[in-house]
Image (tube, rainbow, N blue to C red):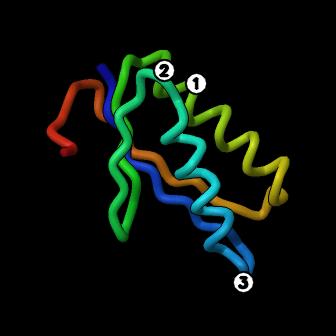
Amino acid sequence: MLTAELSLYPLNDDYIPVIQSLIDELNAREGLKVVTNAMSTQIQGSHEVVMRAVSETLEASAARYGPAQVLVCKFIPMALDIA
């Protein structure tokens, strides 16, 4: 089990669609628990599912909105209560 906290910082003025798109893509993934608050999004699942989700959603976001964005991730190799 792997838990991660993600914060996306688009480097442009129209940042809300970029962030919302990443959150929507994470929520659509199978095997991934997703909890979003005002500061970040926490995700949880198997190591493989979490790492693939982070990699693929960042790649898709960069392709859709351009590379001017920073994704900050904190990983904890255990299940935490992210309810």
Distance Cα–Cα, label 2 vs label 3? 31 Å
For the N terminus, which image quadrant? top left
Identified by mark 2, the residue type is: Val
User: In this view of the protein, can residue 23 be seen by the observer?
Assistant: yes
Seen at 38% across and 42% down, the residue is: 34
Inter-mark Cα distance, 3 to 1: 28 Å
Where does the image place residue 60, in percent across and percent down from the top left?
75, 42
* Residue type indicated by callout 3: Asp
**Label of residue 52 in the image:** 1
Q: What percent of the width, then of the height, locates residue 2? A: 33, 26
Quadrant where the C terminus is found in the figure: top left
Residue drawn at (63%, 33%), measured in percent from left and top? 55
Q: Nearer the viewer, residue 59 or 76?
A: 59
Marks 2 and 1 in Cβ contact (< 8 Å): yes
Q: Quadrant of residue 37?
A: bottom left
Q: Could you tell which of marks 2 and 3 lies nearer the N-terminus?
A: 3
Q: Residues within 10 Å of mark 2 (few under 14, many from 20)?
A: some
In the image, what residue occupies the spot 77% across and 64% down?
A: 68
Q: Earlier in the sequence, mark 3 or mark 1?
A: 3
Instruction: Name the side, left or right, on which 28 lies relative to 60.
Output: left
**Which element is circle 2 on?**
helix
Secondary structure state at the residue bearing disc 1: helix
The residue indicated by pointer 3 is 13
The residue tagged 2 is 49
